[in-house]
Image (tube, rainbow, N blue to C red):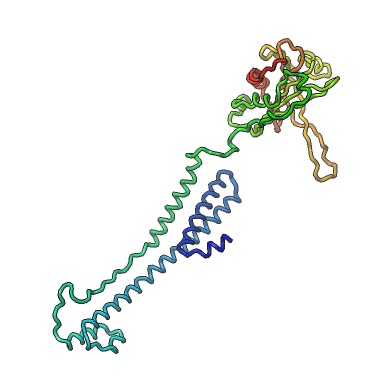
Amino acid sequence: MLGFLIRRLPFWVREPLLIVIGSVLGIRILYLAVQEHERLAAGLGVVFLVFTAVRVHSVVQALRARRNTDPAASADGVAVDAAASLRSEAGPHTDPAVSADGLAVDAAAGLRSEAGPQPRPQYGSGPRPVTATARKEPNAWAQGVAAVAVFGAIAAALFLLPRVMPSDDSASRPASCSSREHEELPRAYQAEPGAVTGQELCEALNRPDLAQLLGTPGETATAASGSDNTAPLSGGRVAQPEAEVRFDTYTVKISATYDELSVAQYVKLKETVGEKDIKTVQVLGRPGAFSSDHTLKLTIDLSGDGSAAPVDQGPLARTLSVALDRTDRGGSYDITVWSESGALPDDAVLRDIAEKILPTIPERSA
């Protein structure tokens, strides 16, 4: 339908319109292709520019054709006007046959000799001689230069506009925590009034300087989430909210467990099972401990042949567990960091993150 409407437009409306559309689309697509390093988009932009060049050529040819035909028509008009002027001067003695043969000059001379000396017309009397001036057509080269200048101005505007105007691209903004204010908390949170929620942990973890604390200041958070989970315990379940923030390099997770297991008991349990990569530390005056463990990797087998295991061992993660209070009466905050490549930051990085985050977590009174 759109193509039909465009074809119905006059030539001098349709062609400039197609030139403007083709040039804007071609330059914009090429600019995006250079930014994103996409060869397919670059080829599409070149196609639009070639299409625009063909249209410009057709317009230039049309301008040249008009320039070549108009002077001839103007010359014919001058000849006709001259013949008419000669007839008016000759009066009744004009020879029609001679005029029809186009011998305007000879006829004029004969008429003057037969009519004798004619009085010189006074100013303002009789018909005024008609003078024709050839209409000046635009130069094709000037049109081409103007078209190139317009295309250059459009390209410069498209290139400078993202730098001058504020960007609305959501991809450049860090991820934010989704609001979960109206969701009902599980019963385990009612039994532990001092427990925080996953939303509160997410807001505390998703700090503007978190990437800088991780040693990757140029990155922005790609995902941020919080959940109000629970953990099994003898006699019921306990609150275990958690939050996670993802970057291109690292993923950081924080959880709070409200059980009766102290950090000191946790360290002894790890040593009993033969854990060697465990280290005790003091964080904000509270007992803490570093430990390492592998994450779980979930695999979805779409082929159905059962060749891939549904749960596999993922990359190594480093965790810093900090007691909920200085007395270490039970429960802890666990801050875990891992990456897809398996690289881990230093333990000092986790300690700095804990010292920045834990004081911002709201304290709930029992």
- Residue 37 visible in image: yes
Q: Residue 336: x and y, percent?
A: 71, 24
Location of residue 296 with respect to 150 vertically, above or below:
above
In the image, 226 versus 350, the foreground residue is 226
Q: Residue 262: x and y, percent?
A: 77, 14
Q: Quadrant of the C terminus?
A: top right
Q: Quadrant of the N terminus?
A: bottom right
Going 56% across and 63% down the picture, which residue do you hit? 4
Q: Quadrant of residue 95?
A: bottom left
Going 76% across and 29% down the picture, which residue do you hit? 295
- Residue 348 visible in image: no
Q: Residue furthest top?
A: 327
Location of residue 53 with respect to 265 vertically, above or below:
below
Number of marks? 0
In the image, 145 versus 17, the foreground residue is 17
Relative to 287, is 173 on the left or the right? left
Q: Quadrant of residue 100?
A: bottom left
In the image, 22 versus 319, the foreground residue is 22
Relative to 280, is 121 on the left or the right? left
Q: Residue 129: x and y, percent?
A: 23, 74
Q: Quadrant of residue 215?
A: top right
Location of residue 67 with respect to 116 vertically, above or below:
above
